[in-house]
Each structure stands twice: as structure tokens, then as C-alpha cells.
Amino acid sequence: MRLLTPRLILREFRDADFGSFRELEARPETYHYETVSPSDEGTREYLQKAQQDALQSPRTRYRLAVTIQPCDDVRGRATLLLLNDSIREWEIGWAIHPQDWGKGIATEAAQRLLEFAFVELHAHRVVAFSHAGNTASLRIMRKLGMQQDGLLRETRLWKGQWSDEVVYSILDHEWNTSHTKDQ
Ligand SMILES: CC(C)(COP(=O)(O)OP(=O)(O)OC[C@H]1O[C@@H](n2cnc3c(N)ncnc32)[C@H](O)[C@@H]1OP(=O)(O)O)[C@@H](O)C(=O)NCCC(=O)NCCS
């Protein structure tokens, strides 16, 4: 699968991506708000699992590489995972190489993935979870038109401290309305 945006290609991972993907995964900034950073082996496993996702039918997981045209190196990852089939609820996620932060790359990738979720997967709800202190991620959620559903108190043990997590969502009719307004 390939999703195009004006600047990006979101595509399936390949074994050959290990080098550029590892550069993203090994950066401490990428995992600043997470509890653990993956090892080399963990990154290899992610690549394998991401490729297995593409063989599923029906597919419930999309773990895609983000590349910046015209280069084919991995500069980020964007994910869409089925959370609750009975209410057509999917979870979206993102990470971009720190050298490319602040250029709107994550927002552009996530907007395309949201469109895919609502148009192709007929999602009813798309949700995103974030450490409450991850202001860049929260800003993306708001730019996508997502609204805060709630705050999960002390659901993350982060750097030795209990930390809160926020949940944002956007519904199919909200996305349709904003999308129609943009035309
Ligand atoms: C979160 C992340 C994906 C953002 O990627 P990005 O490509 O820089 O994002 P964008 O440029 O599309 O948008 C970031 C927005 O956050 C804002 N922002 C960035 N850092 C900020 C901060 N410390 N405080 C407030 N706003 C901030 C930017 O100004 C921008 O908003 P704007 O367009 O209104 O100016 C990137 O920082 C990252 O990969 N972090 C590590 C992984 C991660 O945390 N993933 C999310 C897990 S929930």
C-alpha cells in the first residue's frame, strides 16, 4: 500500500529499511515520552511485524514508513491499528526523525492516514493517545481536528514518575464536515 501527499509517501516497510529506520528508532528524542527504547533486535522485530501486517485479511494493523520525496529513506513511521471492531474504532500514531521536526511532516502524514481511515476503512472513530506533556503531539491532534475525550490519570510510569495520558478522538461526521469545508 502507498499513500501519497504533496511531500510524502507512506508505504510498507521492507527489510532494506533497517538502516534508516534504526536511525529514527535509536534517537533518544523519538522515545523521550515512552518508557523504553527498542534495541536493534526490537527494531528488526517491528520491521518484520509491520511486513506481516500487510498479509492480513482483513487487515487490522497498518504500520507504515514515512518517506520524504524524492528520497526513499525512512524518515518516520505512521500507524493505524484497529482497537474496537464493533464500533469501527482505530488508533492513529506517529513519529518523525528529529532532524525533520517542525516542518509539518507528522501532520501531513497523519492527515493522509485519517483520510484513509475514514474513506477506505469506514472508521467511525479515530483515537490517539499521548503522554500529557508531549505538547508537539497534542498540537498535531488539535491541528487534525481531534478533540480531547479525556485524561487518564497516572497510567504511565515515566522516568520513575506516574504520568497522565490524554486521549483525543475525531468522529467520521466531524472529519466529513471539515473535509467538505476545505473543498
Ligand atoms: C510529535 C512529533 C511526531 C511531531 O512531528 P513534527 O513533524 O515535528 O510535527 P509537525 O511539524 O507536523 O507539528 C508539530 C506542532 O507542534 C508544535 N510544537 C512542537 N514542539 C512544541 C512544544 N514544545 N510546545 C508547543 N508546541 C510544539 C509545532 O510548532 C507544530 O505546531 P504548528 O504547526 O502550529 O507550529 C515528533 O516530535 C516526534 O516524532 N516525537 C517523538 C515521537 C512521539 O512523541 N510520537 C508521538 C507519541 S503520542
Image (cartoon, rainbow, N blue to C red):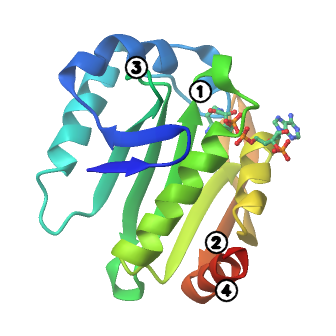
- Return the disc, 4 or 1, that comes first in the chain's sequence: 1
- Under circle 4, the secondary element is helix
Q: Residue drawn at (65%, 48%), measured in percent from left and top?
A: 107
Whether residues under marks 4 and 1 lie with C-beta atoms below 8 angstroms apart, the answer is: no
Relative vertical location of residue 82 with respect to residue 24 in this rendering, above or below: below
Which mark identifies residue 152? none
Q: Given this view, does label 3 or label 2 mark the residue nearer the observer?
A: 3
Tag shown at residue 31: 1
Which of the marked residues, 3 or 1, is nearer the chain's N terminus? Answer: 1
First in sequence: mark 2 vs mark 1? 1
Say whether residue 155 is left or right of residue 161: left
Q: Quadrant of residue 22?
A: top left
- Callout 2 environment at 10 Å: few (<14), some (14 to 19), or many (20+)? many
Mark 1 C-beta closer than 8 Å to ligand 1: yes
* Residue identified by numbered label 3: 73
Residue 50, by quadrant, is top left
Q: Where residue 40 sits in the image (x, y, percent)? A: 34, 13
Q: Quadrant of ligand 1?
A: top right
- Residue 177 is tagged as 4
Residue shown at 66%/76% (left/top)? 183
Query: For mark 1, does the 10 Å Cα neighbourhood hold few (<14), some (14 to 19), or many (20 or more) residues?
Result: some
User: Mark 3 vs ligand 1: CB under 8 Å?
Assistant: no
Label 4 beta carbon within 8 A of ligand 1: no
Tell me which amino acid carries mark 3. Answer: Asp
Q: Amino acid at mark 4?
A: Thr
Q: Nearer the viewer, residue 152 or 110?
A: 110
